[in-house]
Image (cartoon, grey):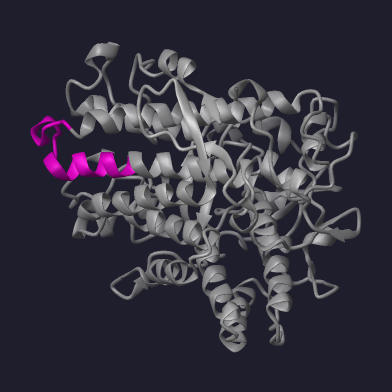
Amino acid sequence: MKTHIGIWMIASLLFFTSCNEWLDVRQEGEFEAEDLYANGEGYRAVINKLYKMMAESSLYGENLTYGVVDCMSQQYALTEESNANSVYRSFADFKYTDNGVPDQIDAMWLNGYRMIANANDLLQRIRNAEDDMFEFGAVERHLIEGEARACRALVHFDFLRLFAPRVEDAGEDVFVPYVEDYPNTYASSIAVRPFLEKVINDLTEAKRLVAEFDTSADGRLVNATAAARTAAAPTNNFGYDNFFAGREYRLSYYSITALLARVYQWAGMQEEAFACAREVIGFAENGEPFYKDDFTGVKTTTGFDAAAFDQKSDYKTQSNIIFACYDRDAYEDSRLQYQFKHESLNRSNEFFVLDVETLFRSRGISEMSSDVRYQNMVFLGMGQYPISGKYYLPSTSPESATHLMMFPVIRLTEMRYIVAEYYARNGQFTEAYQELNDIRATRGLGELSNGSSFDEFVSDLVEDARREWISEGQLFYLYKRLDAPYTKNGVQRKLSRSEALLPVPSDQTN
């Protein structure tokens, strides 16, 4: 199958008339298209733009996090009263041909491959670039090249998870193209296994390239804590400039390793997934882990109303986030002011109302009264609609709230899940449940007794993951990969093939 993605790619590539802000640091200057790659500043502008594109609402700024994919995961109890946007309800009902749904899918597809096209052009050019074009020489060139490869791999991989079956069900059929050249007028779709090989190859090479900076003393300095990873500027004793800051919002050595763990697990390469996950869990500086669970700011005060939530200093357990997309203008760009509005209910609202009765049950028992993730991270819009507190709109100046500017893509918790699943697949249920119970303990929950089968473990894993990943776009993929049942309207069932695959846009094939 040939996929027609090239014409609009060619038209859309060199549209950078100015450098975008990265975090809160403006890079001044304007570039004509033909001069964009004349020096290192141009390459910086392009890699920054790739991340900006990833954070658009059609991708990780909504659809691939709290929006479309989480509607498909049945996290939400969407009604016409609480969510006036019928497109979201159609995704939740797996009605992928309903009016408005194909347009949403088209936007995801087109903007994803548009970003990939820009990454491909950068990669083709930077391979021939001289080190002295860049202020920090080879270290900077390698960092930009590695991040571009990782950006390309991430979006390709998520499109595979959306538009193709899981590995076990895919056979030799082709579904999605892996585009590595620019320009590419017609890209051929390929089978799932060779597609995954390309993802792994990109990420492995990306990890090698960014290691030069990220594993150096300076690199570890800006990766070691949540505050350092999200800072727009590093400390005064830093040997590089601000371009090298904000590593939580960049695909660093550590986030690429975590992403490799995710990809290996999807590919059924359990040993490799386990090794990468353990590597991420073990990252530490002076004995302190880089990534951990810190609910201090989340638990500043309890309660489900604005008075309680306005006092919180951390809405997304930032210490646990390995990689997140960033958009300084997300409040408007992602329409958060409508989707998480809590003052009034009218036809403009698009509340993503959580199905908390399902999400917070474990082995048939409700755990809402004790789970930190309910007691401290769920807000009641209008005093009655449970909404994710991760996107709580502060009563004062919500447009400048920093937690609204980040869209978590991968967490430390997922690495713990990968380790636990590896043990369970090998019949080591004591070790598997030790991992799960360690997670539960930090969230205020008691221990689960050990299951004795992989199916029992999967049930317990899903019951924790569905509340850990609220509004983060990962739950649907868990159901799909494990062929695990989801709950809809009180009934448990598994995803059918037609539900598990988004249709490739009809005008993209011939």
Q: Image quarter for residue 358?
A: bottom right
Give how far across and how far down residue 434 sits, in percent: 58, 83
Work out which quarter of the rendered image holds the N terminus and state it: top right
Question: Residue at 71% across / 84% down in the picture?
Answer: 451
Question: Residue at 25% across / 44% down in the picture?
Answer: 143
Identify whether 123 is placed above or below 482: above
Give how far across and how far down residue 201 sits, in percent: 35, 51
Q: Is residue 331 left or right of residue 130?
A: right
Residue 477 at least partly seen: yes
Question: Residue at 45% across / 72% down in the picture?
Answer: 271
Q: Is residue 57 left or right of residue 93?
A: left
Magenta segment: 128-147
Identify whether 474 is placed above or below 416: above
- Residue 142 or 469: which is nearer the viewer? 142
- Residue 70 or 422: which is nearer the viewer? 422
Dominant SS of magenta comes to helix
Residue 464 shown in magenta:
no
Q: How many marks?
A: 0
Give how far across and how far down residue 63 sits, in percent: 63, 37
Identify whether 71 is placed above or below 372: above
Residue 138 shown in magenta:
yes
Give how far across and how far down residue 226 sits, in percent: 42, 57
Identify whether 384 is placed above or below 459: above
Q: Residue furthest left?
A: 132
Question: Residue at 60% across / 88% down in the picture?
Answer: 430
- Residue 79 or 316: which is nearer the viewer? 79
Q: Residue furthest front?
A: 172
Q: Is residue 485 left or right of residue 400?
A: right
- Residue 479 or 440: which is nearer the viewer? 479
Residue 25 at least partly seen: no
Work out which quarter of the rendered image holds the C terminus and state it: top right
